[in-house]
């Protein structure tokens, strides 16, 4: 298994030298990408790590699909003894990068360089150097085999995928959707007795064919793109009842954290050195009966709500 340092070196060798440093990355929650070395290196390089959910490898909706597609077509173009697939990998990579993606309508080459590089072998042979002819024919044959395998793998993936997946209830951007609770940590001791769905959360973008981006609370420190299998369209209750109140999300430090919807009031509490600023908080997803006074330390992640309150109430304490 590669160490965190090995992964960092691979990034330098194959990615960063060509494309520069990314603003963010999407990875699983494996030990390598959660290692202290990677976390601190990312912090120094101003790279924001986001994580797909380990229990569902399709959460990011694009990367995993490409990986599965690559695995399928590599199986197709390799010979029976599996002795030639390593030599054909560069051609496979070239073919993939030259392929138009359904999510963007362009190939990776077009996005990076503005055009699709050509790959063609001339018909004229040179009998003086037969080895050169043989190598050119190997490249031509290999490239055609890779392209054919890639086309077949796409058709096969689409057929089987369409058999198993359909847009659930026709989720659209602007709708709200429930998110499956699987492997999202809360403070509740029994997963079986917890709510099976979280939210509902606004759907803000469709990613590819089968994934959606949700507007999540900042306390849910997960990649906000989810495969449709994890989502269910929200339908308002016909009797006007509110959906179940959201459970607190457990932060990386193991502490509960609720989301602040709005600051309603402020006051000083205590005297002398113990004097502290308190805010009256409206919690997102909860009715006014759950409003509570909280010390400023408890709402440190709600700076936007605090600033909005003081802009609307410039004479309030703490301004």
Image (cartoon, helix red, strand yellow):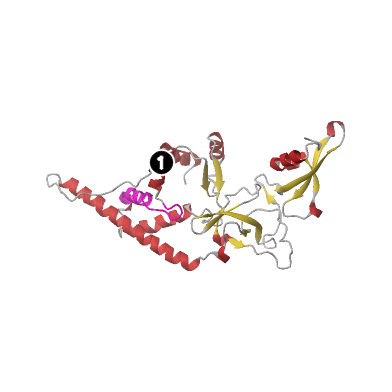
Instruction: Please determine whether, in this image, residue 4 is positioned above or below residue 180.
Output: above
At a point 66% along the width and 57% down the height, the residue shown is: 199
Query: Callout 1: helix, strand or loop?
Result: helix
| Camera-nearest residue between 32 and 231 | 231
In the rendered structure, does residue 95 fall within the stretch colored magenta?
yes
| Residue topped by disc 1 | 14
| Camera-nearest residue between 126 and 77 | 126
Instruction: Please determine whether, in this image, residue 162 is positioned above or below residue 199.
Output: below
At a point 78% along the width and 40% down the height, the residue shown is: 313
In the rendered structure, does residue 146 fall within the stretch colored magenta?
no
Q: Is residue 298 left or right of residue 171?
A: right
Which stretch appears magenta? 87-105
Residue at the outermost right position: 271
Instruction: Please determine whether, in this image, residue 209 is positioned above or below residue 98.
Output: below
Query: In the image, residue 106 lies at what x, y percent?
Result: 41, 51
Q: Is residue 271 left or right of residue 213?
A: right
Instruction: Please determine whether, in this image, residue 256 is positioned above or below residue 313.
Output: below
Query: In the image, residue 160 lies at what x, y percent?
Result: 44, 66
Question: Image quarter for residue 293?
Answer: top right
Q: Is residue 164 left or right of residue 69?
A: right
Query: In the image, residue 277 lies at what x, y percent?
Result: 80, 37
At a point 77% along the width and 55% down the height, the residue shown is: 287
Camera sees residue 34: no
Image quadrant holding the C terminus, namely: top right
Disc 1 residue crowd, few under 14, some 14–19, many 20+, Cα 10 Å: few
| Camera-nearest residue between 152 and 44 | 152
Numbered marks: total: 1
Camera sees residue 222: yes
Residue at the outermost left position: 128
Query: In the image, residue 15 lies at what x, y percent?
Result: 43, 41
| Camera-nearest residue between 4 and 207 | 207
């Amino acid at each position: 298994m590669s160490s965190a340092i090995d992964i960092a070196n691979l990034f330098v060798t194959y990615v960063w030298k060509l494309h520069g440093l990314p603003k963010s990355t999407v990875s699983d929650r494996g030990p390598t990408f959660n290692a202290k070395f990677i976390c601190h290196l990312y912090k120094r390089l101003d790279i924001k790590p986001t994580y797909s959910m380990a229990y569902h490898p399709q959460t990011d909706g694009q990367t995993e699909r490409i990986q599965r597609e690559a695995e399928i077509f590599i199986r197709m173009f390799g010979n029976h003894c599996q002795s030639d697939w390593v030599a054909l990998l560069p051609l496979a990579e070239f073919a993939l990068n030259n392929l138009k993606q359904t999510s963007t309508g362009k190939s990776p080459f077009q996005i990076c360089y503005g055009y699709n590089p050509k790959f063609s072998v001339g018909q004229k042979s040179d009998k003086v150097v037969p080895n050169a002819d043989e190598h050119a024919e190997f490249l031509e044959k290999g490239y055609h085999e890779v392209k054919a395998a890639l086309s077949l793998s796409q058709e096969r993936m689409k057929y089987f995928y369409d058999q198993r997946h359909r847009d659930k209830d026709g989720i659209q951007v602007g709708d709200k959707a429930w998110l499956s609770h699987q492997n999202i940590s809360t403070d509740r001791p029994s997963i079986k007795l917890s709510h099976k769905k979280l939210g509902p959360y606004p759907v803000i973008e469709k990613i590819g064919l089968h994934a959606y981006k949700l507007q999540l609370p900042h306390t849910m420190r997960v990649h906000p793109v989810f495969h449709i299998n994890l989502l269910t369209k929200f339908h308002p209750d016909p009797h006007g009842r509110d959906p179940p109140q959201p459970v607190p999300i457990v932060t990386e430090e193991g502490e509960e954290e609720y989301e602040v919807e709005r600051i309603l009031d402020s006051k000083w509490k205590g005297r002398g050195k113990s004097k502290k600023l308190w805010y009256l908080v409206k919690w997102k997803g909860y009715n006014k009966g759950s409003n509570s006074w909280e010390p400023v330390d408890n709402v440190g992640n709600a700076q936007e709500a605090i600033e909005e309150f003081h802009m609307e109430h410039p004479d309030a304490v703490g301004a």
